[in-house]
Image (spheres, rainbow, N blue to C red):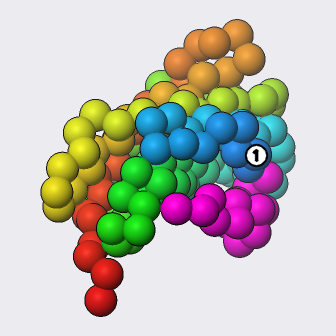
């Protein structure tokens, strides 16, 4: 499977950079900035959820390749540390890859390698129509 364009849409709005994208590991980095803050001046939790989903979906799609497509059916993300600025890095890896579903975990760390959020996404593997 060819890696899809990972520069437009929500990826562009959030300013995400895919540092690595394979069937076994996805690494995304981005800069925390005021337009990504919630009203109290820290990184919005929805950004973490979107990054977790993005990492899992790209990795899952690369693994499934031409056997079909994937869609997220569950995203559970925990916010562990408030972040106001700086660069964050998300690393997604598979926990389980089966015939009909995949489970991916994603850990988000700051520049000091402190865990700031952690999530998991269950993906449904869809067969081609």
Q: Residue at x 26, y 50 (%)?
A: 102
Crowding around mark 1 (Cα neighbors within 10 Å: few <14, some 14 to 19, many 20+) is some
Q: In this rendering, does residue 15 appear at all?
A: yes
The answer to whether residue 72 is left or right of residue 81 is left
Q: Residue furthest bottom?
A: 129
Q: Quadrant of residue 18?
A: top right
- Judge left or right: residue 27 versus residue 74: right
Residue drawn at x 28%, y 34% is 95
Range of residues picked out in magenta:
1-15
Rendered position, 66 above or below 89: below
Left or right of residue 53, residue 17 in this image: right
- Taking depth in this image into account, of 104 and 15 the one nearest to the observer is 104
Q: Nearer the viewer, residue 4 or 49?
A: 4
> What quarter of the picture does the C terminus occupy?
bottom left
Rendered position, 111 above or below 96: above
- Counting from the top left corner in percent of width and height, residue 43 is at 67, 41
Check the image and report above or below for 29 versus 52: above
Question: How many callouts does the rendering have?
Answer: 1
In the rendering, at what x and y percent does residue 77 appear? 40, 42
Reading the image, the residue beneath label 1 is 17
Q: At x 54% / y 31%, what residue is drawn?
A: 91
Q: Nearer the viewer, residue 15 or 123?
A: 123
Q: Position of residue 128 (x, y in %)?
A: 31, 81
Q: Is 58 colored magenta in this rendering?
A: no
The secondary structure making up most of the magenta span is: loop
- Residue 53: tell me if it is visible: no
- x and y, in percent, of residue 60 in the image: 40, 52
Q: Secondary structure at mark 1?
A: strand
Q: Quadrant of residue 110?
A: top right
At 70% from the left edge and 60% from the top edge, which residue is drawn? 6
């Amino acid at each position: 499977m060819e890696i899809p364009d990972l520069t437009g849409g929500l990826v562009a709005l959030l300013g995400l950079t895919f540092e690595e994208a394979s069937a076994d590991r996805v690494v995304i980095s981005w800069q925390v900035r005021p337009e990504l803050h919630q009203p109290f001046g820290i990184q919005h939790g929805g950004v973490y959820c979107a990054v977790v989903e993005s990492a899992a979906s790209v990795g899952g799609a690369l693994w499934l390749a031409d056997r079909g497509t994937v869609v997220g059916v569950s995203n559970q993300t925990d916010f562990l540390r408030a972040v106001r600025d700086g660069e964050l890095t998300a690393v997604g890896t598979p926990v389980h890859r089966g015939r009909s579903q995949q489970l991916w975990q994603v850990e988000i760390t700051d520049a000091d390698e402190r865990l700031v959020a952690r999530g998991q996404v269950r993906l449904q593997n869809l067969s081609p129509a």
